[in-house]
Amino acid sequence: MGPPTAKIAFLPSRLERLEAAHPDIIACFCFAARAPFRGIAGLLDWRLGGALSRLRIDNFITGAANETVLYPLGERLAGARLLLVGAGPRESLDAQTARHALQHLFATLQKLDASAFHLALPGRPEEVSRPEDAVATFLDALTAFPHFRAVTLVDTVAAQARMQPFAERWRLKHSVSAP
């Protein structure tokens, strides 16, 4: 396995910015709960007129650990697909659980032959995990997947400011060119 080559970029978690970026795949996580979707999944659910919420009500989306749903996002995000991965119970999210969820997500993205994607980290929209902890776990898991060329992390501007130093140190350590 070669060294990681993914370029890490950041995008504010705003629907209009996501739409303007024209991503092929938007990946995020959901917890095993009946609560409404939050973060990017919540914004996309709103854009889809509650379609994701209806799937959750019908128990098609449960949020169970490693549950994987690939959903087309329709005309507004033409060609884009949502990859929603279950993270299990919210109260069980820790670094190990997040790492396993990310590894499952990355393995699924490899099967889809995706080399670039937008990602909301596990526990971030809900602020269950600190930005520094979430990005450190993400970068640790990403190291085992050299296939990816570009990952855009979607989070608040304040969280991104706390994540960027970690991403920069990782980039320098792995000699990945800046985006």
Image: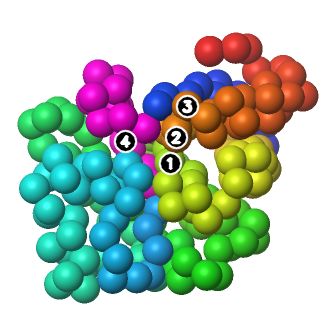
- Residue 16 is covered by the magenta coloring: yes
Q: Residue at x 17, y 47 (%)?
A: 47
**Which of the two residues, 106 or 12, is positioned nearer the viewer here?**
12
Q: Residue at x 35, y 77 (%)?
A: 35
Marks 4, 3: nearer the viewer: 3
Q: Counting residues from the N terminus, which is met first, the one under dot 4 or under dot 3?
A: 4
Specify the segment rendered in magenta: 13-28
Disc 3 target residue? 157
Marks 3, 1: nearer the viewer: 3
Q: Quadrant of residue 170?
A: top right
Q: Residue at x 64, y 81 (%)?
A: 92
Task: Kindly indicate whether the residue at mark 3 contacts the one at mark 2 (C-beta within 8 angstroms).
Answer: no
Q: Is residue 41 above or below residue 179?
A: below
Under mark 4, the amino acid is: Ile
Q: Is residue 16 left or right of residue 47?
A: right
**Which of the two residues, 148 or 95, is positioned nearer the viewer here?**
95
Q: Counting residues from the N terminus, which is met first, the one under dot 3 or under dot 1?
A: 1
Residue 120 marker: 1
Under mark 3, the amino acid is: Val
- Residue 85 x/y as whole percent: 45, 65
Q: Residues within 10 Å of mark 4 (few under 14, many from 20)?
A: many
Whether residue 86 appears in this view of the structure is yes
- Residue 178 x/y as whole percent: 70, 14
Q: Residue at x 51, y 61 (%)?
A: 126
Disc 2 target residue? 155
How many angstroms separate mark 3 from mark 1 (CA)?
A: 13 Å
How many angstroms separate mark 2 from mark 1 (CA)?
A: 6 Å
- Residue 171 x/y as whole percent: 79, 26
Task: Kindly indicate whether the residue at mark 1 contacts the one at mark 3 (C-beta within 8 angstroms).
Answer: no
Q: Is residue 77 above or below residue 109?
A: above
